[in-house]
Amino acid sequence: MEWSTLGDGKFNNRRLQYPTYTAGPNDKLNGYVELMLTAHGLAINETCHPATIPLK
């Protein structure tokens, strides 16, 4: 699992289940940020595709 963002802030660790996100200047200016949580499958043969959920 990995967190990502469309904002300009930073995660303390993208791979933690409950990371801390520090908003960047544009995040604060916009008044919100969109975060995405992506889960990666464990299959070695790539039959499990990543699933992404956006959060606002």
Image (cartoon, grey):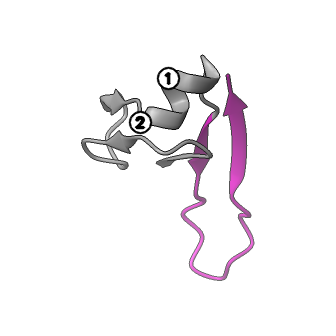
Residue 46 to residue 39: above or below: below
- Between residue 16 and residue 49, name the one nearer to us: 16
Q: What residue does disc 2 label?
A: 24
Q: Image point 24% across, 41% down: which residue?
A: 12
Q: Image point 44% across, 34% down: which residue?
A: 25
Q: Amino acid at mark 1?
A: Lys
SS for dot 1 = helix
**Left or right: where does residue 12 sit relative to residue 1?**
left
Q: Image point 48% across, 45% down: which residue?
A: 8
Query: Which label is found at residue 28?
Result: 1
Is the Cβ of the residue at disc 2 closer than 8 Å to that at disc 1?
yes
Assign the C terminus to one quadrant of the image.
top right
Magenta stretch holds residue 33? no
- Between residue 6 and residue 27, name the one nearer to us: 27
Q: Which residues are magenta?
A: 35-56
Q: Position of residue 47 (x, y in %)?
A: 75, 72
Residue 56 to residue 2: above or below: above
Q: Image point 32% across, 32% down: which residue?
A: 19
Q: Position of residue 15 (x, y in %)?
A: 35, 49
